[in-house]
Amino acid sequence: QVQLVESGGGLVQPGGSLSLSCAASGSEFLFAMGWYRQAPGKERELVALISSTGSTSYAASVKGRFTVSRDNAKNTVSLQMDSLKPEDTAVYYCNAKSLILTRTQNYWGQGTQVTVSS
């Protein structure tokens, strides 16, 4: 079993920056870690993922503004968010993926609120 503990988030003005961090506990190999977000009235959506080898993928809406990074030794994943926009306001969830036989197992953090507002 994997537990994810998030930190960071909060209130920031448009154009500002915030950083999120997530630490994973457990012994399972996590082939990918990253972040999803869910705004009020919307479905949860992928923000950014990073594989154990460092390959990254981003939602088109955040590409060039957000940077995901991972420390495999510490089992942590971070999200640096720059040039934030009001539409980035959402609850951000840390995600980790492991492989059980042929099935992907998703683990989730508790979520942290990010609010972009003047």
Image (cartoon, rainbow, N blue to C red):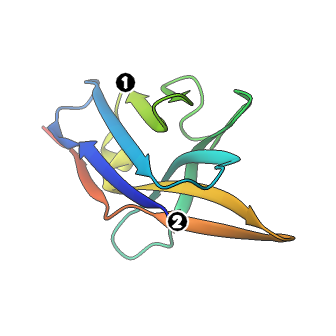
Residue designated by label 2: 107
Give whichever of 91, 15 is nearer the camera: 91
From the top left corner, tell me how far across and down residue 22 is, in percent.
37, 43
Label 1 residue SS = loop
Q: Amino acid at mark 1?
A: Ser
Give whichever of 60, 31 is nearer the camera: 31
Q: Earlier in the sequence, mark 1 or mark 2?
A: 1
From the top left corner, tell me how far across and down residue 66 is, in percent.
49, 29
Q: Amino acid at mark 2?
A: Tyr
Seen from this angle, which residue lies furthest front?
27
Distance from disc 1 to disc 2, alpha carbons, whole Å, reads: 28 Å
- In the image, residue 11 sits, relative to residue 82, either above or below, namely below
From the top left corner, tell me how far across and down residue 26 is, in percent.
48, 55
Residue designated by label 1: 83
Q: Going by the image, does 116 lie left or right of 101? A: left
**Residue at screen point 61% across, 56% down:** 28
Q: Going by the image, does 22 lie left or right of 33? A: left
Q: What quarter of the picture does the C terminus occupy? A: top left
Callout 2 environment at 10 Å: few (<14), some (14 to 19), or many (20+)? some
